[in-house]
Amino acid sequence: MNPSSTRPSPNRPSRARHLLAASLAAALLPFAPAAASAAESPTDGSVVIDDAATEQLIEDSCPWGYTPSSTVFFGQDRANSGVPNRDLGNGCTIMDTIWAEAPFPNHGSFVRTVARLTNMLEQDGTLTPEEHESIVEAAAESEIGKPQPAPGTRAVPDDRIGLVLYTVRATMPNAPEATLAALAACGYRNAEPSGAVNNFYGKTAATLAPIVAQSGLSVPSIGIGLGDLKNNLDGVIANAKAFGAKYVRISGSASWRLSDYSATAATLNAVGPKLKQAGITVAYHNHGFEFTAQNGVRGYDVLARETDPNLVAMELDLYWASSVGADPVELIKQYPGRFSLFHVKDMAPDGSFADVGEGTIDFARIFTYSDMGGVDYYLTENDNPRPNGVSSACDSYANLSALRY
């Protein structure tokens, strides 16, 4: 397989392309927003599409679809085919074509679908026989459509449990040593600090990192701002290395339109290679607003489809997704292998925050899909801890450690 191999001209007549167009029909509705008059003033937060944007949609049948700068990817490791996710000539890629036929009732159905579609692309000359074989092998190695066992005997590995330090933000600025020592004493092995380049709870990374290390905690991930990635990437890398972090994550804004999600995806793809070279993966952390559809398209889907899974991970906040009706299990099924980090945060019956294991979210059900999701770390969090951050964090740790799935 040669990733730089050239696909045929999109204008080339092809029976296979016409047949694949039919497969894509089911996917076009959620991808293509309806045109709206420029004079309209929507009151529901929807995005107005002007004439220029409408012309672009005509040219691109799958706006906000899977990026052609990635590979055909069904999950990590052997489920990643390594084959370029080629644009088939109308803005729709190989991945768009395959996922147009989702959901798949079982694993065999998924593999057969992939084999059928990629066979057509081989006949068309879009794929070589070797690339066709690689994609089908990756599909076979994936977890898509497979039953996920729930023996009720598995525990989250202790060395993969951590705390988002936002939970203890009240005491971190003035008493970091005591706060971190208390967290380590109740069992935590990892922590995720957040802030900006050289400003974590009022301290630089170089100052805070040894304090964290002396407490016995590791830092697998740090939270920084999108502006840091755009304007101070070297600083982001230096801060991550100071902590020993292998992930840096950002969050978005409730004011974003679909074009903002697309622009952010482009930024993450652009900084991804330099971060990877430094041994770091960039991740996106969700709230709830990403799942509000704008003209039929969710911003979260734009981010997931337009980012390269080889460069960009997702940090799935289980509370925020659940709070707006986005099922974490369905997200994992839709985007296998993308969720390196979980924010494990619980929801009280009234919708407020609860300590992990004391609310309504069925973590055991979600964790059953951890392998499919590619989860590396489980980071507990409570945005409004009671009676205090340390007590809340330690209760969450004890409950998560006792959980079996």
Image (tube, grey):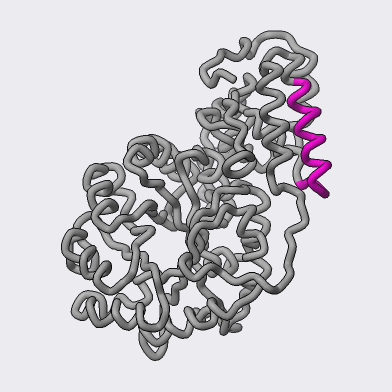
Judge left or right: residue 270 versus residue 71: left
Residue at 76% x, 49% y is: 145
Rendered position, 73 above or below 284: above
| Front position in the image: 60 or 198 | 198
Residue 111 among those drawn in magenta? yes
Q: Residue at x 52, y 59 (%)?
A: 316
Determine the residue positioned at 51% across, 62% down.
342
The secondary structure making up most of the magenta span is: helix
The quarter in which the N terminus is drawn is: top right
| Left or right: 1 in relation to 109 | left
Task: Name the quadrant containing residue 249.
Answer: bottom left
Vertical arrangement, residue 135 with respect to residue 251, above or below: above
The x and y percentages for residue 323 are: 57, 69
**Is residue 184 visible in this depiction of the protein?**
yes
- Quadrant of the drawing holding the C terminus: bottom right
Which residue is painted at 64% across and 53% down in the image?
372
For the record, the magenta segment spans: 103-120
Q: Position of residue 376 (x, y in %)?
A: 50, 57
Q: Where residue 275 sits: x, y (%)?
A: 34, 41
Q: Quadrant of residue 191?
A: bottom left
